Image: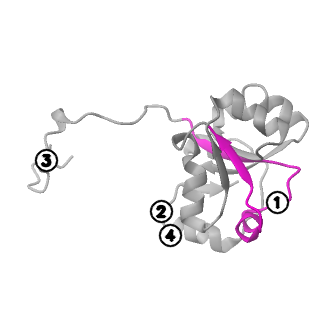
């Protein structure tokens, strides 16, 4: 907008920029196996052994890294799975116990629909949008100080 309205601080030509990003508005969630000892984010923060979260790369695990930075949670992040299906199999086998994934996938396909029917996973965090506030999700407990810290930092990731 700066260039369009003629602000002198805008020292760039918007037409020469390459956009990095995605038009996809699929919110990201963090889910955790329900059979772990971690029942709240406080449990993760205080844990002597960090929960193992799986993913194919840093980009797909950005919510996990954001939680480490924002609230001091510690996760043992295992990267390098060849894709989402391989990461899901690792969760099912118990190699890892948590993963961040798109909300749409988590509620629309296997193995997630089967996992939900068996109460295998619980959703901990989701990105807050108009669409996600209208979708019912099982809630996990989280201390109020973490929520306040997230809100003060302007985070749009809130606990479920």
Residue 76 versus residue 103: which sits nearer the camera? Answer: 76
Give the residue at mark 3: 5
Residue 79 placement, left or right of 138: left
Seen in the picture, residue 25 relative to 63 is either above or below; the reply is above
Question: Residue at horizontal 49%, vertical 32%?
Answer: 24
Q: Which mark's residue is nearer the viewer, 3 or 2?
A: 2
**Mark drawn on residue 152:** 4
- Mark 1 and mark 3: span between their CA atoms? 50 Å
Q: Residues within 10 Å of mark 2 (few under 14, many from 20)?
A: few
Q: Which mark's residue is nearer the viewer, 1 or 3?
A: 1
Residue 157 versus residue 68: which sits nearer the camera? Answer: 68
Q: Quadrant of residue 111?
A: top right
- Mark 4 and mark 1: span between their CA atoms? 24 Å
Q: Position of residue 75 (x, y in %)?
A: 67, 57
Q: Residues within 10 Å of mark 4 (few under 14, many from 20)?
A: few
Q: Position of residue 26 (x, y in %)?
A: 56, 35
Give the residue at mark 1: 39
Q: Are marks 4 and 2 in contact (CB under 8 Å)?
A: yes
């Amino acid at each position: 907008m700066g260039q369009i309205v003629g602000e002198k601080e805008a020292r760039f030509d918007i037409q020469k920029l390459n956009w990095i990003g995605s038009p996809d508005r699929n919110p990201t969630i963090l889910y955790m196996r329900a059979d772990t000892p971690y029942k709240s984010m406080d449990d993760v923060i205080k844990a002597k052994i960090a929960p193992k979260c799986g993913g194919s790369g840093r980009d797909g695990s950005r919510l996990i890294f954001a939680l480490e930075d924002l609230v001091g949670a510690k996760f043992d992040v295992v990267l390098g799975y060849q894709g989402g299906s391989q990461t899901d199999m690792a969760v099912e086998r118990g190699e890892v116990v948590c993963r961040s994934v798109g909300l749409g996938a988590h509620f629309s396909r296997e193995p997630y629909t089967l996992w939900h029917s068996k109460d295998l996973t619980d959703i901990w965090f989701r990105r807050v949008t108009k669409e996600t506030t209208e979708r019912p999700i099982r809630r996990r407990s989280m201390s109020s100080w973490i929520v306040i810290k997230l809100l003060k930092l302007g985070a749009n990731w809130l606990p479920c």
